[in-house]
Amino acid sequence: MANILIVDDDAAVQITIRLLLERAGHHVTVAGDGRKGLALFEASRFDLLFLDIFMPGMDGLETMRHIRVLAPAIPIIVISGRSAAPDAYAEPDFLKMATKLGAEASLQKPFRPGALLAAVDGCLGTAQAASLGNPDVSTGQR
């Protein structure tokens, strides 16, 4: 199956995503921050990335910017535990912002296992179709 990189500073989230993906047959590598994730990305070939938006040091948006320079077409799923409440006084919707900056899909923590696996399948299907030159494929969940 796919070779997937998870970049998240929360060990519980890393373990949860890793177990779900490994049970689905994927190979998983984990990094605890953006710098480590970028170093792993530069050293190996991955089919899909999970990026937490809020991490110490290099956050997910900055990590995504560096990844896009190296591999513009790799599917990225951003994840965040921050509220996406539509309150006028709340902080911006960082998940929506990340998809506008190039993430293929986004997941709000806590997420359901089915939603995670559907996002992975959608992103990998989109990436495979794009590599085959099929222009009529949607770009996944946004």
Image (cartoon, grey):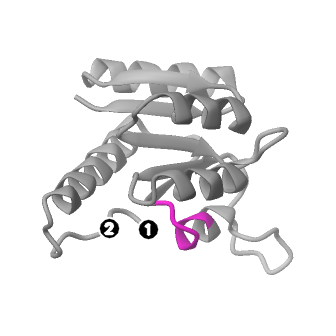
Q: Whole-percent x and y of residue 83?
A: 71, 57
Residue occupied by mark 2: 139
Report the residue at 69% width, 74% height from top. 86
| Residue 93 within the segment the image draws in magenta | no
Judged left or right of residue 124, residue 74 is right
Question: Residue 94 versus residue 38: which sits nearer the camera?
Answer: 38
- Which range is magenta? 98-103
State the SS at label 1. loop
Q: Whole-percent x and y of residue 66?
A: 63, 53
Q: Whole-percent x and y of residue 53?
A: 68, 50
Of circles 2 and 1, the one toward us is 2
Q: Quadrant of residue 113?
A: top left
- Total labels: the figure holds 2
Q: Whole-percent x and y of residue 28?
A: 42, 23
Q: State the residue lying farthest toward the bottom.
A: 88
Q: Amino acid at mark 2?
A: Thr
Asked if one can make out residue 111 in the rendered structure from this viewpoint, the answer is no
Q: Which mark is residue 142?
A: 1
Report the residue at 86% width, 76% height from top. 89
Judged left or right of residue 40, residue 114 is left
Q: Amino acid at mark 1?
A: Arg
State the SS at label 2. loop
Callout 2 touching callout 1 (CB < 8 Å) = yes
> Which quadrant is home to the N terminus?
top left
Report the residue at 46% width, 53% height from top. 71
